[in-house]
Image (tube, grey):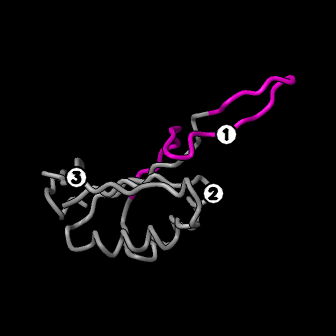
Amino acid sequence: MKRITAIIRPEMLEPMKDALIEAGVHGMSVSEIQGFGKQHGWKEYYRGTEVLLNMVPKVRVELVVADGEVEGLIDTICSVAKTGEVGDGKIFVDPVEEAVRIRTGERGEAAL
């Protein structure tokens, strides 16, 4: 099993959710986060003073899936989230050693 963590633009959440459901994803976790990468934020003016806002709002989508689903889901995420501009986001893939469904005690991929 693998955990896919995608950091995306907030406006991409609804299209991403729809695409992942269509791709057969049974569950996901979504968090609003802030951070920065190469885009390093932007400048705004507050009461005539320039202010650098270097923490950019993003959305983190996390999925735990079977090993064979990873590449297809990465392709789906990239096709939906890509605008071609700096700040489109990142995808991280980590191994998951175990999953347990608390209600039934099922383990491994059966718990997904």
Counting other residues with Cα less than 10 Å from the Cα at mark 2, is it few (<14), some (14-19), or many (20 or more)? few
Task: Name which of mark 2 and mark 3 comes first in the sequence.
Answer: 2
Q: Which residue is mark 1?
A: 42
Q: What amino acid is found at the position of numbered circle 1 in the picture? A: Trp
Q: What secondary structure is marked by label 2?
A: helix
Q: How many marks?
A: 3
Q: Residue 106: x and y, percent?
A: 15, 57
The image position of residue 96, as x and y in percent, is: 18, 53
**Mark 2 → mark 1, Cα distance in angstroms:** 18 Å
Left or right: 10, with 4 as reference point: right
Residue at image mark 3: 101
Characterize the magenta stretch by its predominant secondary structure.
strand
Residue drawn 45% across the image and 77% down it: 22
CA neighbours of label 3 inside 10 A, class few (<14), some (14 to 19), many (20+): few
Residue placed under numbered mark 2 in the picture:
11
Whether residue 96 is situated above or below residue 31 in the rendered picture: below
Looking at the picture, tell me which residue is in the foreground, 70 or 48.
48
The percent position of residue 61, horizontal first and vertical second, equals: 43, 53
Residue 71 or 36: which is nearer the viewer? 36
Q: Secondary structure at mark 3?
A: loop
| Vertical placement of residue 102 versus 15, above or below | above
21 w.r.t. 1: above or below? below
Amino acid type shown at disc 2: Glu
Q: Magenta region: which residues? A: 28-53
In the displayed image of the protein, which residue is found farthest to the right? 48
The amino acid pointed to by label 3 is Arg
SS state under label 1 = strand
Q: Nearer the viewer, residue 93 or 53?
A: 53
Task: From the top left corner, tell me how far across and down residue 103 is, in percent.
Answer: 24, 50
Mark 2 or 1, closer to the camera: 1
Q: Check the picture and name the quadrant holding the C terminus.
A: bottom left
Mark 1–mark 3 distance (CA, rounded to whole Å) = 43 Å
